[in-house]
Amino acid sequence: QVQLKESGGGSVQPGGSLKLSCVVSGHTSSSYCMGWFREVPGKKREGVATIWTGGDKTFYDESVKGRFTISHDNAKNTLYLQMNSLKTDDTAMYYCALDYCTWLGSEPYEYDYWGQGTQVTVSS
């Protein structure tokens, strides 16, 4: 069974940086879709960034373009999210997800496997 474990969350000041990691195990293919999603109380879970591990195709939500970078290290089976210029609105629980995709999706319902989440808090 596919398992994902996030790490790297924490508390930072506005303008700061964090790098999230998600280690994948139990996968049966070297190519699949992965993504970072975030959720805050009272709001629906939303896509932040997604990536197809078989190439360089990526998706970024408009709110994070130019600030966040998603990447995947095939040798380490690890997904990353480099977050720079963090804003208070970025505060959320961040989840990584995986799907054996045919197209790179950006919606939570398109992903079958999920990690436990890691909290990111941006405040002064």
Image (cartoon, rainbow, N blue to C red):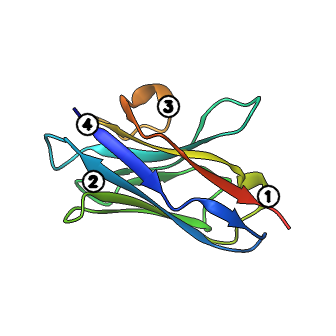
Q: Which residue is mark 4?
A: 2
In the figure, 84 relative to 61: above or below? below
Q: Nearer the viewer, mark 1 or mark 4?
A: 4
Q: Which residue is mark 2?
A: 53
Which comes before the other along the chain, label 4 or label 2?
A: 4
- Estimate the x, y position of residue 17 in percent, counting from the top left: 63, 72
In the figure, 77 relative to 112: above or below? below
Which comes before the other along the chain, label 1 or label 3?
A: 1
The reply to whether dot 3 and dot 4 touch (C-beta < 8 Å) is: no
Q: Which residue is mark 1?
A: 88
Whole-number angstrom distance, CA of label 1 to CA of label 4: 32 Å
Seen at 63% across and 61% down, the residue is 10
Q: Nearer the viewer, mark 1 or mark 3?
A: 1
Q: Secondary structure at mark 4?
A: loop
Q: Amino acid at mark 1?
A: Thr
Whole-number angstrom distance, CA of label 4 to CA of label 2: 15 Å
Q: Secondary structure at mark 3?
A: helix
Which comes before the other along the chain, label 2 or label 1?
A: 2
The reply to whether dot 1 and dot 3 touch (C-beta < 8 Å) is: no
Which comes before the other along the chain, label 1 or label 4?
A: 4
